[in-house]
Image (cartoon, grey):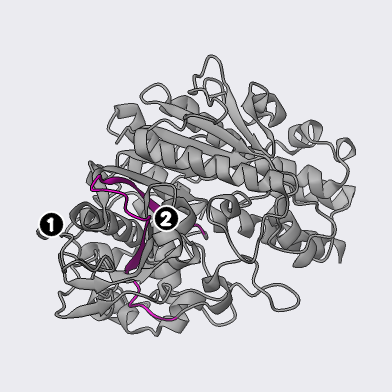
Amino acid sequence: MRSRSVRRTATRAVTAVAALLLSITAPPAASADSGHDPLVVRTTHGTVRGAAGPDGGRVFQGIPFAASPTGELRWRPPQPAAAWSGVRDATAPASPCPQLPLTLLPDGGPVLPGDSNRTGSTTEDCLYLNVWTPARTGNRTLPVLVWLHGGGNAYGAGSDYNGAALAARGVVVVTVNYRLGALGFLSHPALSAVSADHASGDYGLMDQQAALRWVRSNIGAFGGDRTRVTLAGQSAGSVDTCLHITSPTAKGLFHRAVQQSGSCVSHGALTPLTLAAAEMKGQSFAASVGCTAPSTAPACLRAVPTTELIRGAPGAAPPLWGANTGPSILPVSPDKAWAAGRVNAVPTLSGSTHDEYRYFTALYVDLLGGGPLTPQTYAALIRLQHPDRAAAVLDTYPASAYPSPNLAYSAVGTDQRFACPARADSRLYSGRVPVYAYEFNDPQAPPFIPAPHTPQGAFHASELAYLFPMNALPLLTPAQRRLSATMAGYWVRFAATGNPNGPGAAIWPRYAADRDRIQVLAPDRIAPTTGFAADHRCTFWQPSGTS
């Protein structure tokens, strides 16, 4: 019984890791027209009416940036959105892309705070974006921040993030929906055979680039500067941002990047599958929904109801999805792109949270896995997940060195999967471009889920409430609110200039590999540290030459 329990716990923990890490031609430029009503804006496809936001700002929601990817457009590159006549209402968000609700807690509650996580969705007509602008103080154009949500490329929506607070500081914020799960990332030999690239997959990445092309053509009408676009994301959105840095089809679509808790290139990161591996996975998925004959697989798959595609085979857990090489959007792996110097090298703000993996331990071990680890089950889990070096891992992270085995296990996941890959990215990027590296470390950050056996600390995604204020996660102390204001200022100044520094804020040094200074973002404790690598044991996790 104990062995089966350990294996169930291990499977869920592995799933948690994987779940994280988890074109359209531009029409003529849009214009700020439509008389003197600031809530009415003319885009290249038609006119939209938004709503007044706080402090004189504006919000435009549910603007289509590509055609509905349904019917024959399933598993095809995004196509141009249809034009419309009249004034389109843009005062409410569109549906999230298809996904299951994440109502996994014992009381039926969601494990993440976004609305999409409570409701899920079966609506494939979902390629829409949202725009927040500040109150206009003149005719100058403003920097733009395009946000890619996290959720393992299987969950989440742009509408989960309210950009008003960042916009109020002088930036135009755009949040984006993109195809998720099998609909966004399925690769299959039959789909490859009928594509122009003779490859398939990465439709979600194509959607993100279609949104960036919409921004290039239209953001000027909303007061944004098309020459100062920052692509930013967290978790899977950060991994995707990392991939766009190495994508030839993203050249010129953004000018700075923000990666929050997600890497695609460094040792320990979530690198994309090869096309062959992705197609093999896709064939297994197709068989699970009854599409086994190669000659009829595309038509068969396009006829499968959305509800089956987001669940997979009856009784099976939803399959996990991510990018693959092969399509023109990602012709080679990120490490090969960097080695060849064929990347979209832009100034980058990049980092992680101090206790990333505690969230997953609390969820998949405590709440869904039957309770806290013991020293014995912790050791068994490490042996299962690290069969080639279990003894070394246990020697480096002995349960006795931590307040609990849960926290020992969390430290392993944090360091291997998040902290050290983020630092390695900074070291790699800083040889080409300015890099500003951070670690978010509020040990009292508002938690998403109850965690009786695992103090959450600065858990995965805990920094989001400091950049996108959420009613469900209020910042409770003046020090937390000051940290939120400081972080927002850093992010907006970086979007504006490529440098987060400015008057009144603690100096954030540019990252250099030889000095290895990473900015700690903690309540009333904002300063660089040189102790990050030792704290997270990066010499243990990173191979020679990358530590």
The residue mark sitting in front, 2 or 1, is: 1
In the displayed structure, does residue 196 sit left or right of residue 265?
A: left
Q: Residue at x 64, y 24 (%)?
A: 529
Q: What amino acid type should be assigned to the residue bearing mark 2?
A: Leu
User: x, y (%) of residue 362?
Assistant: 75, 58
Point out the residue furthest to the left here.
28
Check disc 2 and report its element: helix, strand or loop.
strand
Q: Is residue 168 visible?
A: yes
- Local crowd at mark 2 within 10 Å, few (<14), some, or many (≥20)? many
Answer left or right for 321 relative to 14. left
Residues rendered magenta in the picture: 122-150
In the image: residue 362, left or right of residue 110: right
Q: Which residue type does callout 1 highlight?
A: Ala
Residue 6 at what x, y percent from top left?
Answer: 79, 59
CB atoms at circles 2 and 1 under 8 Å apart? no
Tag shown at residue 29:
1
Residue 299 found in image quarter = bottom left
**Residue 211 location (% of width, % of height):** 28, 58
On whether residue 136 falls in the magenta region, the answer is yes
Residue 116 lies within the magenta run: no
Per the image, the residue denoted by label 2 is 148
